[in-house]
Amino acid sequence: MHNEDNEHQQIKSSVGGWRIGKGVNSHGYDLLKDLVGKHSFFEVLILHATGRLPENNFHIFVENVHLAMSYPDHRIWCNRIASLGATSGLEPCSSTLLGTMAQDSTGYGVGTLTACGQFLIKINEGLSHRTLKDLLETEIKKTRGKPKIIGYSRPIANGDERIAALKQVAVEQSLKTGKYEKLAFDIDHYLTGNYNESINFSAYVSAVMLDNGYTCDEIERIYTFVVALGALACYRDYSSQDSLAFKPLKITDLEYTGKQPRRLDD
C-alpha cells in the first residue's frame, strides 16, 4: 500500500548526491576523487546520461559529434533564437537554452538522432522475414513514392560533409563497423541508386551509437545539448549590437498570397 507519509520530505535517488562535509557521490564514483582530474567532461556527461562510463575512449567520438553540430550559422533556427535573445536583452544561459530547446524535433538535432535509431532498429528486425528493398519500398509508399526517410535526406544539400570527418575519428579510435552501421550504408546504397537520396549525419551517428551498446533513450540524453555551442556563438555575435538588431527577414521578403487588405469596418 502506498503511504505518502513515508515519502514526505524524502528524495529517492539511484544516481548519488552530495554528502555534506564528506564528498559527492555519482553513480558509485567519488566525483572529486575519482572523476575530477581523471576523466573528461564528455566521459562524465555519458556517465550522467547512462549510468556508466564509456569504454575504449568512445567519449572522443561523442565529443566530435558535438563539434560537428556546432555550426555558428544564424540561419539555423536554433541559432536564430539565441541571436534574437541576444538583442532582446536575455542572458547567454537563457538564450542558449532556448535555442537548444528548438532542436527537440525531427528536423534537426537530437530528435533526428533518436528517430534514426528507432528506424534502424525497425528495419533490422524486419530483415528476419523481408528483404531490405521490400522494407524500404513499404516506407516510401507511405509518402506517395517519394522517399522521406529520416536520416537519408537534408533540407538543402544532398550528401553530408560531416560523415567523412566523423568516420576518420572512428578509424583513429579503432571503432569497429557493426551491424547497424553496415545496415545504414546498405540503405544509403539502395536509396542513392534508386532515388538520389543519401545518408546524412543523423543516420550515421545513430548507427555508431547503437553498435556501441547505447539505446535510443540514452542517445537522446547524451546529445541533449548537441546544438548549444553553435547557439552560443551566434548569441555572442549579436550580444554587443543594438536592441532588436537581429532581423533575419523583412516584410518584403515574404510573398503574401492571401486576401487583400480591407477596412476593419467592412
Image (spheres, rainbow, N blue to C red):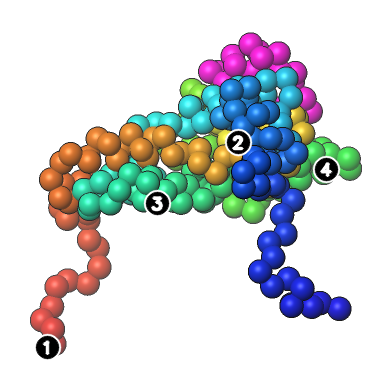
Quadrant housing the N terminus? bottom right
Which residue carries the number 1 mark? 265
The image quarter containing residue 129 is top right
Residue positioned 36% across, 38% down in the render: 232
Mark 4 vs 1: CB contact within 8 A: no
Which residue carries the number 3 mark? 98
Which residue carries the number 4 mark? 125
The image quarter containing residue 40 is top right
Residue positioned 35% across, 42% down in the render: 79
C-alpha span from label 1 to label 3: 40 Å
C-alpha span from label 2 to label 3: 20 Å
- Sequence-wise first label, 2 or 1: 2
Q: What is the three-letter code of the residue carrying label 4?
A: Glu
The label shown at residue 45 is: 2
Left or right? Give the position of 200 relative to 206.
left
Classify mark 4: residues with Cα within 10 Å, few (<14), some (14-19) or many (20+): few
C-alpha span from label 4 to label 1: 62 Å
- In magenta, the rendered stretch is 164-181
Mark 4 vs 3: CB contact within 8 A: no
Dot 3: element? helix
